[in-house]
């Protein structure tokens, strides 16, 4: 598990290094996540290389929000009188996130369904029939 943690930490530091070296306005941890995504997508990083540490981090995700909550409590005097604005922004951003997530899921489902339908049919070389996976056939004229 230490090896998996070192992979995640190395990618994080690489993202931070790129951000500092190039002076990008994007946070280094976001760049690190993009590097991790590209590595997983291209197969340079296998899921088995980071699966145990990823599960551990996800299982303990709520623990990582404690410092932010404590700092929010200690900064309570700065937030005094701004609750309406904070609540408004929270509600609007939640609605936007729900909408974008729903649209993304619908798009992904349609895309995967279309891709599955295209690969579902295979052409029978000996005749002009298409045989689907559920063993239905159709004649092609």
Image (tube, grey):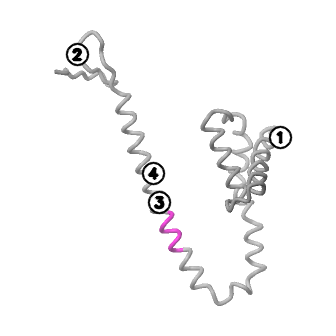
Q: Residue at x 31, y 24 (%)?
A: 132
* Label 2 residue SS: loop
Q: Which residue is mark 2?
A: 128
Q: Residue at x 27, y 21 (%)?
A: 130
Up the image or down, 38 lies above or below 128; here it is: below
* Label 4 residue SS: helix
- Which comes before the other along the chain, label 2 or label 1? 1
Q: In the image shown, does 20 or 120 lie closer to the viewer?
A: 20
**Residue 137's spot in the image, x, y percent?**
24, 21
Residue 18 shown left or right of residue 87 in the figure:
right
Query: In the rendered structure, which segment of residues is drawn in magenta?
Result: 91-97
Q: In the image shown, does 10 or 133 lie closer to the viewer?
A: 10
**Residue 108's spot in the image, x, y percent?**
44, 46
Residue extending farthest to the bottom is: 81
Q: Which residue is mark 3?
A: 100
Residue extending farthest to the top is: 126
Q: CA distance from mark 1 to mark 4?
A: 34 Å
Q: Which residue is mark 4?
A: 105
The answer to whether the residues at label 2 and label 1 have Cβ atoms under 8 Å apart is no
Q: CA distance from mark 2 to mark 1?
A: 57 Å
Q: Residue at x 64, y 38 (%)?
A: 40
- Which comes before the other along the chain, label 4 or label 3? 3
- Determine which quarter of the picture holds residue 54: top right
* Label 1 residue SS: helix
- Which comes before the other along the chain, label 3 or label 2? 3
The answer to whether the residues at label 1 and label 3 have Cβ atoms under 8 Å apart is no
- Determine which quarter of the picture holds residue 37: top right
Residue extending farthest to the front is: 22
In the rendered view of the protein, which quadrant contains the N terminus? top right
Q: Which residue is mark 1?
A: 2
Q: CA distance from mark 3 to mark 2?
A: 44 Å
């Amino acid at each position: 598990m230490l090896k998996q943690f070192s992979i995640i930490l190395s990618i994080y530091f690489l993202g931070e290094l790129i951000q500092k070296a190039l002076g990008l306005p994007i946070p280094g941890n976001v760049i690190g996540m993009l590097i991790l995504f590209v590595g997983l997508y291209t197969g340079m990083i296998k899921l088995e290389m980071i699966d145990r540490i990823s599960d551990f981090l996800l299982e303990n995700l709520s623990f990582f929000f404690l410092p932010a909550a404590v700092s929010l409590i200690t900064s309570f005097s700065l937030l005094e009188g701004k609750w309406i604005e904070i609540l408004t922004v929270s509600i609007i951003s939640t609605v936007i996130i729900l909408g974008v997530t729903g649209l993304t899921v619908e798009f992904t489902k349609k895309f995967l369904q279309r891709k599955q339908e295209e690969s579902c049919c295979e052409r029978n070389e000996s005749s002009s029939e298409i045989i689907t996976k559920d063993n239905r056939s159709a004649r092609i004229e």
